[in-house]
Amino acid sequence: MHISLYRTTIWLFCCFTLCRAKTEPEVLLVIACPPYPRQAQDECFALAGSVREQHRQLNLTRDIALGNYVVKVHVMHELFNYWTLLDALPHLQSQTSLVSKRTEWIIWCQHNTQVASLRDLLKHLRYQDHDELAFYGHALYDSEATIIHHFWHYKDPRWFPYPMLSAGLVFTGSLFRRLTKLVALNAQNNSRPSEFSIDASHELARFIFDNIRPDDDGDHPEHRVAALSRKIILKNVPYICPMAITTQSPKSPTRGAPSCALYAKPKEPYVPGLTSTTLGDRKKHCVHTTGSHIYFAIKTCAKFHKERIPIIERTWATDTHYRRYYSDVADDGIPTISTGIPNVQTGHCAKTMAILQLSLKDIGLQSDIRWLMLVDDDTLLSVPRVSALLSCHNHSELVYVGQRYGYRLHAPDGFNYHTGGAGILLSLPLVRLIVDRCSCPSASAPDDMILGYCLQVLGVPAVPAAGMHQARSQDYAMELLQLEPPVSFHKFWGTEPDYTYSRWLGGKLGNRSAPLTADRERSAAAPAASVHLLGRLPVPGGGVLPLEAVLESSGKHLDL
């Protein structure tokens, strides 16, 4: 009799558990996990473990105020195009067990998002309408129209909110399912304003704004007319913060605890020689790197010698040991090294390939140089921060670091590349591979795009660096600049370069740069680079792609 009662109890418990799983609402927490940098993987799994443990503790208390949510955690490992978020949606749709009709909330996190309190987050969600077409986050705003957002709504750009992705983003299930369905129906992404992916956050907010209306699937004609006058924009909420905010009241029992349920965790800086547990094991593979280990190849031309080079020389050049100015003409007064390539207005592919060839020849057998950085003559940067960034990358491997952009990521011929104005960091083995295997379809083809495409074909990933910037400091939200110490900015127009360098890059005005070593014999003897121009390159996954068909002309290059 006791055995029969035991079996009945077990059967009833299993039935209760199964029925509960089929009826209780779900919350899905997605962690978009990039393969690089290496410590990001550890951060992803640490976040997943923290959320699961918090959920386990909540299940023990069974607080009715939190609702009866089933919390699921999914670590989504990044493919080449997942970072844009819109391109990650088809993957989530294909995982039929992840998002169902019972999924009321989808919480999107990055590897450096912190879920400070799952309890507080669920309490907030319980009092919000999951049936509404809405998404919630920490809102960022442009201070002026900027090219990184395609100059969208240039007459009044400051009103449009877009989310700080690293702080976390919350979708209602209704909006997420509608958005996923729309992206799937528009597989060729004809609705996107540009084929370039630059800022995944702004492009997501704009896609929703442009393409989804409340009740746009209603049958009644009046509903459809009313929907035309309404748009969906990000809702700013106080429980999602750009960084941790702690309570200060001495009477608060939770003094010092984060008051935000979600926030972005600043990147831990690399400190040479520091092996404390706060930095963990991630530093054990790091190699102390300084400006003396980096060869700076600066791309310039005759008309900018007097205008731009003096700015570099009085700012970041002081921290370099090896820097060379490569131009269309040799100028002994600087000195510059002639590439033998005539200057063109856009593209510069042949010139860049020549610079890489000449740089390798200049470096020769100098064993202390580990990296090469391609830099424009109107780029400002922090050499110490570049060095710190490179310290935890293996210079003996094929490493390609910069500010990542994407081109046609929704299509089979899409690819990632690092935009040139922010600076492009290459390990020396990779420079040798590029010189050996990559070439230009035309002399004026966009150099950074051709380089990125070739490296994707060769299986070398574009590793993003959050602190590198293709545009000016005023083109980025303040919260982003405060979260990640800036490494570089691009363009001098509309700015005061000396102030930008002093304010954001840790520089001191009045620096006197180390004198350039004038190697007039090398400059005079340097042969014009012989760059073999190919019109076709292989497509990832097989086949051959005519690059002219993809780019059509260098005019498609987003030359900032």
Image (cartoon, rainbow, N blue to C red):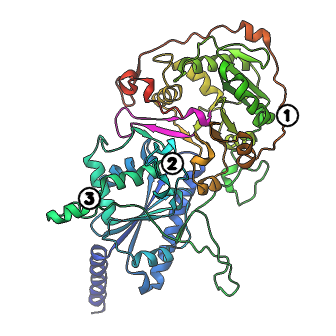
State the count of labels. 3
Q: Residue at x 43, y 85 (%)?
A: 65
Q: Position of residue 306 (x, y in %)?
A: 73, 24
Of tags 2 and 1, which is closer to the observer? Answer: 1
Q: Which mark is residue 228?
A: 3
Q: For residue 489, what is the image quadrant?
A: top right
User: What is the crowding at mark 1: few (fewer than 14 residues within 10 Å), some, or many (at least 20)?
Assistant: few
Q: Earlier in the sequence, mark 3 or mark 2?
A: 2
Of tags 3 and 2, which is closer to the observer? Answer: 3
Of tags 1 and 3, which is closer to the observer? Answer: 3
* Residue type highlighted by circle 2: Pro
Label 1, secondary structure: give it. loop
Q: Position of residue 347 (x, y in %)?
A: 52, 23
Give the residue number, with chain letter if any, for mark 1: 512
Asked if residue 114 lies in the magenta stretch, the reply is no
* Residue type highlighted by circle 1: Arg
The range drawn in magenta is: 403-424
Give the residue number, with chain letter if any, for mark 2: 34
* Residue type highlighted by circle 3: Leu
Q: Residue at x 57, y 53 (%)?
A: 477
User: What is the crowding at mark 3: few (fewer than 14 residues within 10 Å), some, or many (at least 20)?
Assistant: few
Q: CA distance from mark 3 to mark 2?
A: 38 Å
Q: CA distance from mark 1 to mark 3?
A: 60 Å
